[in-house]
Amino acid sequence: MLVNQRLWMNFRLALTSFFLGILTAFMAWSFQWVMESWKEVTFDMPGDVTVLRMVKGPQIVAAADAASAQEELKAYLCDRSLALVVSSSGEGRPEALIYDPHGLVAWFPRGNPEDLRPAIGGAYLFKGTYSERRWSESTTTPLLPKGVVVEGVITAPRRAGDLQYARTIGRDPLPPGQYTLNTTDPTQVRHILDLLYRMGLVPQGIQRVPLLVYLTQNPLLVITVLFLVAGHVCAVFYWSLYLRGRAREFGIRSRHGALPSELVRDNLVGGLPGLAVGSVVGVLLAGVLVAAIGQVRLAPGNFLTLAGAAAAAAAIVTVTWLMTLYVIIRTRYEVNLVA
Amino acid sequence: MALRRWPTTLALAGMIALACMVLSFALVDVLSQVAVLRGAKQLRERHAVIFTPYYPHGERSSVGDDTVKYLMNLIDRQKAYTTIVFNMGLDDPNFAGGHRTLVLFGDVIPKLFPDLQLCNRAPCAARGAKIAGQNIDSVSIAGESIPVVKTLPAGATFFDVGVAGLPLDRRIVIRAPTKVLPLLQPTEREEALARAVLLDPSEAVVDAFVSGCAQGGLFLVPHEVAIEQPQKFRKIMMTSAMYIVGMLGFLGLVFAAFVSSARLTMRQENRAFKIRQMYGATPIHISLRIGGFLAAVALVPQVIVLSLLVVFLLMTGAPAPGAALWVMLALILTFVFLWFLSVRDVRAQE
């Protein structure tokens, strides 16, 4: 291959992989965000979760029945090694109620086993919230229920949002709200729903959230993947037009004994610098631009994501280039022998 | 030319249109957020505290009159203001002639939002530009008759931090006296409490207000606008920036593919161009023909889609419908550039 021609090819490859690099960075970033928001959904609990949106039901429930059902629920959760997080979604107190006898909720202090059956659980304030600030400055906590003692301050889980504190589920009746369970087993969920029904609550929405489903339901990730795929389609289109323009050259080479595999290898290796430089520059530029427009300083974690994105971009682009080369040279090889 | 190559044409046109749509939406988001940030500059400078409400389960809160009086006192001393956006007159379909309203409490509001051009002395009301023709002389709140005295300029928008950019063209904006606050319906009163904005309050004032509301079952989580708004703004900007940069990257790729495909087309059509020239086609004819082809792929479908988007944005009252127009302008410039390049290319081959 002529030096000039090789330079041109590398320039074309660098240009396309530069744009593809931007799109890959875009996707890597959205993937990272989705993984973070997955932790929000699960309240950092391990495994897949079910989110039940519970509201007050029409059934009339005696207080004693509700209390015994609540104790049954706790026993069931303890028995099946499950954890339950009840969080407010704009209603009730801005709090998270937790029942976690086996210490699955990493951010919540486990406490002594005998503490799991208190009448009213003590509250752990989330760091950085209004309640935490007021408590540490003047021990006033206007948003806590009366009689609840502050046990300490913990780092808030990602989903916390405006929630102010977390406390263990005690004997006071459970409020409506979002019930997050670390199981997707239908029989377990059914049993828990039965117990909740006896406590006067009915589900308004049941959401089983396995990670894979969650990923495919996230619009940001779907859009970025879609655009990355469409971008690769464009790149293949662009490259195949370029390679078809070189059909005559391939024909001459093959007459002089070059095998298709040799042609593919030659062009693949020759194009690697362009592909690599293009992808890395694209990813870096995307990172810098996003940081500049968003006026944020990039954290080391972001650089790790960017590095990963650059590697991924270069790898995917190389595979696409290889496939395009293979298909075009294979299909054009025979034709060019006669041409 | 474009019709004969419809699969490629359609695919490219579709991709460009889609990317332009996403780009417009991202720009709308950025522009409206910038407007909110700018609108809240005064609020940040005055260390405003706003609240996120947590309502009681399935019932209305019952916040005591003393807390409402506390807020009234703050508003009268120009240390606070509050608004009712959604819940005013829900029980009364004839309230304000059936129009949507925005009720403002506080003489400090005109100072905080000087661009709003409200009526001068409370109690008074102003109608939005698009309902100017309707004959509404006065609005009655809790027995108090408030005269409608003027019409707002078209496109007026209220930038409260809570409701990012509220278009006022179809609303009646009422500056109500604080004395009606305790007389409001429970839902109206609840919203007025939840939307309270305290200006440079001491911790004790916030505590007193939050505790008072909490006793009535309305839990308000306070936020300092000066601290939290820029953080939120940066996060939204970053997402939008990602979309914008990503879409520009994608468009770059699509246009690269399009340019090389267009070149190929021109080369294939070279003979046709020659024949046309022989039969008297002038360079203007040829360039018009090329322009028609380019427009069919990279201009007309997108402009149609973007125009529909502008209409949609205007109808839904989105804060910055101009963003789609900017994308359209960029598209037209790209088109002119491509046209110029292609014509030069074809002429060079003659």
Image (cartoon, coloured by chain):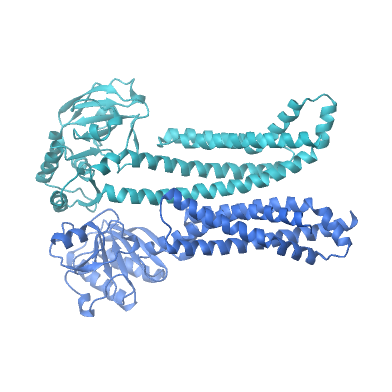
Q: Which residue is drawn at 76% across and 27% down?
A: B283
Q: In which quarter of the image is residue A300?
A: bottom left
Is residue A242 or residue B311 the one in the foreground?
Answer: A242
Q: Is residue A1 left or right of residue B122?
A: right
x and y, in percent, of residue A171 in the image: 19, 69
Rendered hue of chain B is cyan
Quadrant housing the N terminus of chain A: bottom right
Q: Residue at x 16, y 50 (%)?
A: B206
Residue extending furthest left?
Answer: B66
Residue A222 visible (yes or no): no
Q: Quadrant of residue A72?
A: bottom left
Give the tally of numbered discs.
0
x and y, in percent, of residue A329 in the image: 78, 59
x and y, in percent, of residue B64 in the image: 11, 46
Residue extending furthest front?
Answer: A3
Q: Which residue is drawn at 60% across and 45% down?
A: B15
Residue B75 visible (yes or no): yes
Q: Quadrant of residue A101?
A: bottom left
Q: Which residue is drawn at 35% across and 38% down?
A: B165
x and y, in percent, of residue B41 in the image: 30, 40
Is residue A335 or residue B240 the one in the foreground?
Answer: B240
Chain letter, blue: A
Vertical comparison of A82 with A309: above or below: below
